Structure formats: structure tokens, C-alpha cells
Image (cartoon, helix red, strand yellow):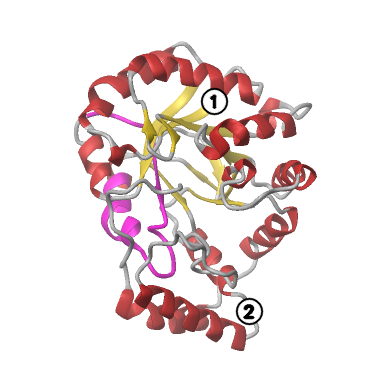
Amino acid sequence: MERRILGKTGLSVPVLSFGASSMGQEFRSVRLDEALASVTTALDCGMNLIDTSPFYGRGMSEVLLGVALRGIPRADYLLCSKLGRYDLAHFDFSARRVAESVDVTLHRLGTDHLDIMLCHDIEFVPMQQIVDETLPALRRIQQAGKVRFLGFSGYPQKIFRFICDQTDVDCVLSYNQYTLQNTRFADETVPWLKARGIGAMNAGPFSARLLTNAPLPAWLKEPESVKAAARQAAALCAARGTDIAKLALQFSLAHPDIATTVAGSANPENVRNWARWAAEPLDQALLAEVRAIFAPVQNLGHAEGLPENN
């Protein structure tokens, strides 16, 4: 698995990281044996940065991840979790909850430190609190050795400048905005982050199944024009003998200034496929055709301002 350095942290991360949201049954009921096996499969494939959150399964993801990692040397993997979002509409970025949340996460995961801690989906609260209260509290925890690096995550691109113009962070995570259809993260934000030495992390290369052959979930908020373009692109890929998910993943991994892309599944076979695709060359001719299909709906996304199931 190819690796890149995350900003100025010096942390070497795989270009493809394992997302544990599915282990919290965020998208479907999961089998315990498959969920646990997906973690060891990811590690075997070189995806040794694992991303989770207390929001995923309202703690279930962190608990199962902790079980899956028992007996595996801590030096063999990197852990990224989040804080501040605990249910669909429950957010608490207070300093008191920061300290409590970190300790609960460490207990669930069975570790004494996190490699990365992110403030989760900050756009749904008054963001000045993140600057004035949340990040200072998190830095105190960093100084105590419980967290190595810190940052925040969210969907609107405006959040990255709002926070980083006022305070220092090590890395940020953007989701569903560096895909075959939506490249706003790379267009608007990644060069700005690179100039400041802030590590860029991407999540959601399949854009909540939009860029797969799976049925679209009822909660997917993308415009109908985007969904129609995605179906057309998927049909073209199938006619060329490939899966649109493969092209989508390879496209997201190819950007040299995005340190890692997070993809998650509680199905070990999916994880194996992704690792295999990551090692194969990107079909540039097919990519050009698919990007042409998406050109009329390029960078159209869902409305910003409602809590997302990220």
C-alpha cells in the first residue's frame, strides 16, 4: 500500500484508510464475525489507519473496533477518532465533554492514546466555540499524551478557512467532496491546506453509494440530476467491463496532495477488493469519459446545514 506524509505531522499514512462507521451499523445490520474480520483484513492489506467516532453506532463502532484490535500490537496501526457529535442532532463541543469523550473513546478502543482526534461535523454548531473552547481543551489533552495530532471534520468547504485562519491544527477531514462527481475539496481547499502544512484527509470516495452499483439509499440527498449522471456513468463502466466503484476509488486515491482517503465496510471482501484496486493502474481513457458525463453536474452537492450521517 502506497503511503504519504500527513501534512507537517511526519505521520506516514496509507493512501487508503479503513473507515469503521459500518461497524456501528450506520448503513445496515452487520454480522459480528464479518465486522471483526473486516478490521484484520484491512490491516493485512496495509490499511493501518483506522477512522471511527462515538457517533457511529452511538459507541458501537468504537467498542467493536476495540474488540477487533485486541492482541494486535499497538505499533501496527494508527487510530483516528472524533468528538463533539454523539447522535443525529446531539452535539457537545464543551471543554468538559472533550475531556470525558477522549477518555471514553480510549476505554472503548483499549488503548492509552489516539494518533488523531478530530472535532466531528463542526458546521452544525457556532464554530467560534471550536476555536475558543474545544481546540484549546483538546490541546491540553494532547500535551498530556492522550492524543498525538488534532483537527476537525465537516462538509462545507468554508469551515476549513474559518477555523485555520484563527488557530493551528494538524489535519482536517473532508467527506464526499473529492469524488468523480465532486472535486470541491481539491479545487478550493487542498492547495490552501498544503501551503500551511495542514494534512488533508478525504472520506467518502463512493459518495454514500452514489458511485457504486448498489441501490441508492432513501436518505441520499443528492439532486436527481446527479443521481441520473451517476447511473449513466455506472452503465458506461459496466459496458467497459469494470465497476464504477473501482474507478471512483482509484480517482480519489490518485491526488498526490491528499494524504489518505477513508473508505469503510463491515464486509471483508469489499476491503480486499479496495486494496487490490488501489494497486492497479487508473484507466485514464475511461476516467475522461466518466468525467465528461459528470461535467454538467460537477460539484453539485446536497444542501449544507442539515446534520448528515457522516
- Amino acid under label 2? Thr
Residue assigned mark 2: 242
How packed mark 1 is, by other alpha carbons closer than 10 Å (few <14, some 14-19, many 20 or more), is many
Residue found 49% across the figure and 79% down from its top: 231
Dot 2: what SS?
Answer: loop
Residue 78, visible in the rendered structure: no
Find the residue positioned furthest to the bottom: 239
How packed mark 2 is, by other alpha carbons closer than 10 Å (few <14, some 14-19, many 20 or more), is some
Left-right relation of 63 to 149 = right
Magenta stretch in the rendered image: 167-193
Residue assigned mark 1: 114
* Residue 207 image point, x, y percent: 47, 61
In the displayed structure, 99 sits above or below 108; it is above
* Residue 230 image point, x, y percent: 46, 76
Q: Is residue 189 magenta?
A: yes
Residue found 32% across the figure and 23% down from its top: 134
